[in-house]
Image (cartoon, rainbow, N blue to C red):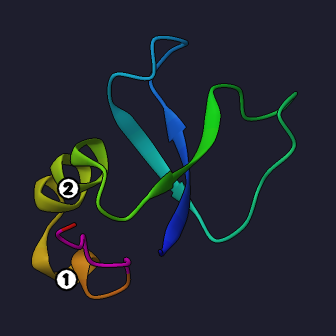
């Protein structure tokens, strides 16, 4: 299972706003979590990015 380090827009963890290559300092970057590449929130974030950005992101996977 591929996992991805992300930051959510708020504590509800409803939508991803940032992608990180590794965990960050939670005091500087709140609302972080490690999610699966099959998570629907990751797919929504990935699909909202330009194709030129998507090439640098882990692709969503189907479970």
Crowdedness near tag 1: few (<14), some (14–19) or many (≥20) residues, C-alpha within 10 Å: few
For the C terminus, the quadrant is bottom left
Residue sitting at 87 percent across and 43 percent down? 25
In depth, the one of 55 and 38 nearer the eye is 38
Tell me if residue 3 is in the magenta stretch. no
Q: Earlier in the sequence, mark 2 or mark 1?
A: 2
In depth, the one of 62 and 14 nearer the eye is 62
Mark 1 sits on what residue?
52
How far across and how far down the image is residue 13, in percent? 45, 22
| Magenta span main SS | loop
Q: Is residue 36 left or right of residue 5?
A: left
Residue sitting at 73 percent across and 35 percent down? 29
User: Range of the magenta residues?
Assistant: 57-62
Say what secondary structure mark 2 lies in.
helix
As measured in the structure, the alpha-carbon distance from the residue carrying label 2 to the one carrying label 1 is 16 Å
In depth, the one of 45 and 35 nearer the eye is 35
How far across and how far down the image is residue 12, in percent? 45, 11
Mark 2 sits on what residue?
43
**Above-or-below relation of 50 to 48:** below
Q: Looking at the rendering, which quadrant does residue 7 occupy? A: top right
Q: Is residue 13 left or right of residue 50?
A: right
């Amino acid at each position: 299972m591929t996992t991805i380090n992300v930051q959510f827009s708020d504590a509800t963890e409803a939508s991803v706003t940032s992608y990180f290559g590794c965990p960050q300092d939670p005091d500087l970057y709140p609302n972080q979590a490690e999610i699966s590449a099959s998570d629907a929130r990751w797919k929504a974030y990935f699909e909202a990015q330009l194709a030129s950005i998507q090439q640098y992101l882990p692709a969503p996977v189907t479970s």
